Amino acid sequence: MSFPAQHDHTITFAVTTGVGWVRLLVVIGALLVTAAAYVRPFAPAGRTTRVTVTTVAGCAVMLQLLLVDALDMPEQAVVGALAMAAVPIACTRHRTPTPAALRVRRVAPWVVAVTGALAAVELARWLAPGVDGGEAARLVHTSLVLGLVALSWLTVCRRAGRGARATAVAGWLVGTVVLAGATVVAVAT
Amino acid sequence: MTDTLPLGRWARLSHLLNTRWHRAALTVYAVIVIGHWAEHLFQAAQIYVLGWPRPQSLGLLGMAYPWLVSSEWMHYGYAVIMLVAFVTLRHGFTGRARRWWDTAMWIQVWHHAEHLLLLVQAMTGAYLLGASAPTSIAQLVFPRVELHLFYNTIVTIPMVVAMVLHRRDHSSEAACTCARPVVRGRLAESAA
């Protein structure tokens, strides 16, 4: 059964606010998540911090979709990126890690590596000569989305043990990519 | 559920809503949900049974108050009311009923997030990925599907299952009076 066309979420605001505050929230969110990634090797994050960081990252990813006409990926993949951003939120929510959360923790370094690398590639493509306005915005926002997903997954990685140093370095590198992307979003797009 | 009342005002209210007032609260909530469904079914009947033009098919209340149908605030307000009820009344459920209730609650959390996103789009005038109208996340995967009806259906089904199971729950865990009295009487007889 199709549904009446009137139930179409009509805009009922006489005046719209514009996207300035959305842009501000995205930049603040990106800065917070990056800061958490930078200090992570030195300061152990509690559960509240991890929930906050993953939630802020997820919200920033969501809000970014309002700032750009398209990302450098199919729309169906955008839903996948949102789902990826939601996984760390679900994992950090429980006080005692669930079996699923432990499995997520095992694969988290690989997710950070892959999404972080893709974020860096998108940012590098934005730096390439001959990229016009619309394409530039698409690449920067895609880089930021992927970078925030990577940093969100970083919060569920182990801080100690084998590979901890590599994870810390990866966090700093991806954090730098996100910081660069957020700066561009703040001033240029 | 503890025997001693919590100290905080909100904790006390929450305790009462999940024990002595649980049945009344669930009844009020069910009336709201059924009213929402009735309004939409009435609207569908206006279109498909009575053959009214769509712009004039506003449901029962919508005919008197057309803004009820078109206001994004109204849709969002209903989503918030549902979410608050799911969160507040969940402690009264136990066992399988609690699992079904929690399932409905998490679906509603997502439904609410979608409504919030639509509201933000309406407020800012910027639509998701350059769309021409406020667009939800699910519409990126399932275009041109009426998701509102779908979401309400998949929230309502586990909610109703939870309520039915809760009415049949006679375990000692249940601290409210929602279980059917007749069956409780039978149980008392069988126990005697």
Image (cartoon, coloured by chain):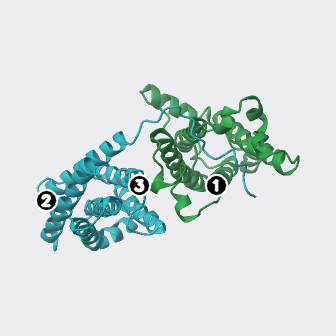
Instruction: Please name the color used to draw chain B.
Output: green
Q: Could you give the CA–CA distance between mark 2 and mark 3, rounded to whole angstroms? A: 31 Å
Q: Which chain is cyan?
A: A
Q: Residue A61: which quarter of the image?
A: bottom left
Query: Residue B22 location in percent, x, y?
Result: 62, 36
Q: Could you give the CA–CA distance between mark 1 and mark 3, rounded to whole angstroms? A: 31 Å
Residue identified by numbered label 3: A65
Q: Would residue A18 appear left or right of A23 to someone viewing this image?
A: right
Q: Residues within 10 Å of mark 3 (few under 14, many from 20)?
A: many
Viewer-side label of 2, 1: 2
Q: Residues within 10 Å of mark 2 (few under 14, many from 20)?
A: some
Amino acid type shown at disc 2: Pro
Residue B5 visible somewhere in the drawing:
no
Query: Residue B68 location in percent, x, y?
Result: 67, 34
Amino acid type shown at disc 3: Leu
Amino acid type shown at disc 1: Pro
N-term-proximal mark, 2 vs 3:
2
Q: Which mark is residue A41?
A: 2
Secondary element type, mark 3? loop
Q: Which mark is residue B158?
A: 1
User: Which sits in the foreground, A24 or A116?
Assistant: A24
